[in-house]
């Protein structure tokens, strides 16, 4: 999964630091990084319509200088690198480049969170996950949090140390599970396996106490089987079985357990594979302060 990855960048404030945090993937099999900067024609059209001049040659020259810094770092880490400057609609160009360069993972994401209010994941990242058939790592390198009136900065410098794997027992969740052993050599040592028993809607038929106990026992049995599977792969493992709204419980566990990464499927049971970007995974990506690896 990690042999050749696509790293689109607009040279945002934390883009280079995010790139550096991915270098440990070399131990997990990373050989090449395709760096991509897109000169977004949709954005340029808006600028032109406002009457401002646009010099695409100057934009490309500036991008080459920025990409050279990224190239130098990756080469110093012994990682192969190819730089691409594309021109066209942003998301379409990213997806076309991913297909043309035969990458197995796309890096995307919002890297900064405002403490003044909820900020949804960027529309670019949302569309990449929705339209791509590849796994997408939503990097959230830099996070602002508030505690007791004090704003602090948190930086993810050990991305794969402790993984939260939430499962709803779907085929997509099983595919996400298969990605986790690949992170072992990249530094992953601990896995929390979680399942959320979803709250029933008010008009739903309430199951009997006996049926509820059977369901809970079956979930615990399946969680224990996953625990043993990950332990055989060399991980330290704990399990969580909780009730509530899945995305809220997943993000609560991630924050309270101080995980470094959430690995989950893009959609759950009942959806046609590859066609839908599920509401639970979408909300986890939107609201989580942790990076999320979304597997199709």
Image: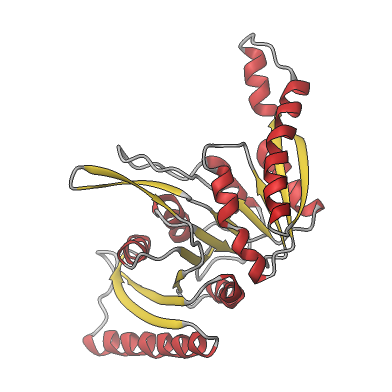
- Compared to residue 128, the image places residue 53 above or below, namely above
Quadrant assignment for the C terminus? bottom right
40 versus 52 height, above or below: below
Check the image and name the residue furthest to the left: 148
Q: Residue at x 52, y 69 (%)?
A: 270
Q: Is residue 133 visible?
A: no
The residue under the point 74% across, 21% down is: 58
Direction from residue 154 to residue 230 in the image, left or right: right
Which residue reaches farthest top? 51
Percent position of residue 13, x then y:
52, 37
Q: Position of residue 245 (x, y in %)?
A: 32, 63
Quarter-of-image position of residue 76: bottom right
Q: Is residue 260 left or right of residue 57?
A: left
- Residue 240 in sight from this viewpoint: yes
Where does residue 175 sit, x and y in percent of width and height?
A: 59, 74
> In the rendered view, does 189 fall on the left or right side of 238?
right
- Residue 184 placement: quadrant: bottom right
In the rendered image, the vertical position of residue 39 relative to residue 27, given as above or below: above
Q: Quadrant of the N terminus?
A: bottom right
Where does the image place residue 102, in percent across and percent down from the top left?
79, 58
User: Splitting the image into 4 quarters, where does residue 77 fall?
Assistant: bottom right
Q: Residue at x 54, y 61 (%)?
A: 293
């Amino acid at each position: 999964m990690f042999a050749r990855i696509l790293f689109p960048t607009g040279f945002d404030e934390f883009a280079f630091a995010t790139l550096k945090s991915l270098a440990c993937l070399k131990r997990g099999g990373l050989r090449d990084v395709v760096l991509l900067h897109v000169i977004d024609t949709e954005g340029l059209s808006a600028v032109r319509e406002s009457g401002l001049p646009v010099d695409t040659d100057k934009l490309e020259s500036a991008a080459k200088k920025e990409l050279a810094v990224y190239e130098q770092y990756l080469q110093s880490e012994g990682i192969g690198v190819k730089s691409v400057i594309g021109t066209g609609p942003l998301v379409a160009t990213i997806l076309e480049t991913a297909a043309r360069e035969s990458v197995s993972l796309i890096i995307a994401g919002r890297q900064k969170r405002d403490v003044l209010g909820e900020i949804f994941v960027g529309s670019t990242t949302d569309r990449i996950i929705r339209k791509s058939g590849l796994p997408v790592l939503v990097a959230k390198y830099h996070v602002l949090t508030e505690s007791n009136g004090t704003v602090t900065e948190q930086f993810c410098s050990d991305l794969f140390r402790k993984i939260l794997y939430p499962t709803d027992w779907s085929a997509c969740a099983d595919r996400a599970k298969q990605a986790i052993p690949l992170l072992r050599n990249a530094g992953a040592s601990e896995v929390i396996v979680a399942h959320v028993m979803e709250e029933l809607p008010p008009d739903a038929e309430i199951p009997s106490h006996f049926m509820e106990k059977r369901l809970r026992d079956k979930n615990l049995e399946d969680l224990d089987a996953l625990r043993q599977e990950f332990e055989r792969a060399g991980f330290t493992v704990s399990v969580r079985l909780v009730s509530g709204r899945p995305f809220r419980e997943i993000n609560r566990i991630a924050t309270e357990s101080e995980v470094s990464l959430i690995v989950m499927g893009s959609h759950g049971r009942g959806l046609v594979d590859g066609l839908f970007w599920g509401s639970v995974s979408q909300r986890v990506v939107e609201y989580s302060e942790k990076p999320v690896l979304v597997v199709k």
